[in-house]
Image: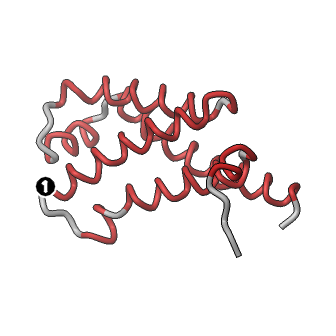
Amino acid sequence: MSASWRLWIGWGLSGLVMLFLIMDGVMKLAGPSVVVQAQEKLGYPGSVTFGLGVLLLVCTALYAIPKTSVFGAILLTGYLGGAIASQLRIGEPWFSHILFGVYLGLFVWGGLYLRNDRLRAIFPIRQ
């Protein structure tokens, strides 16, 4: 794959996941009742919703900045791991709820892998 296409696809994957995470973070900041109820269903008090939104937006911003993108991806992986554990704990369906964090994580790291030469040098795909 040429460097140009790899970069475009990488930013495309990263852009999709960033748009989703920004939307999710802003919804948590706004705190409509449906979001607070979803948090409470997961076993978290509604009062943590705003803080989770701030955390998600900070992690996403770090991921969006090329110099801090690997650090942002690591933080997002932890955030998504917590989301997966929360969904698993209350017995949500696997493919639509529990594994959704895995899908997002694949987009986070897949997009970053395609757009970051140094990451590809550390973890080369051998043929």
- Give the image location of residue 105, x and y in percent: 47, 53
Under circle 1, the secondary element is helix
Residue that numbered label 1 is attached to: 89
49 relative to 65 in the view: left or right: left
Q: Which one is in front, 119 or 103?
A: 119
- Location of the C terminus by quadrant is bottom right
Which residue is at a point 48% across and 25% down the rendered structure image?
Answer: 58
16 relative to 77 in the view: left or right: right
Q: Is residue 58 above or below residue 34?
A: above
Total labels: the figure holds 1
The colour scheme applied to this rendered structure is: secondary structure
Which residue is at a point 14% across and 47% down the rendered structure image?
Answer: 41
Disc 1 residue type (three-letter): Arg
Which residue is at a point 19% across and 58% down the rendered structure image?
Answer: 88
Q: Quadrant of residue 50?
A: top left
45 relative to 58 in the view: left or right: left
Q: Quadrant of residue 63?
A: top right
- Give the image location of residue 111, x and y in percent: 64, 53
Q: Which one is in front, 58 or 4?
A: 4
- Give the image location of residue 118, x and y in percent: 71, 43
- For label 1, the crowd category at 10 Å Cα-Cα, with few meaning under 14, some 14 to 19 and many 20 or more, is few
Which residue is at a point 48% across and 31% down the rendered structure image?
Answer: 59
- Give the image location of residue 16, x and y in percent: 61, 51
Q: Which one is in front, 40 or 79?
A: 79
- Location of the N terminus by quadrant is bottom right
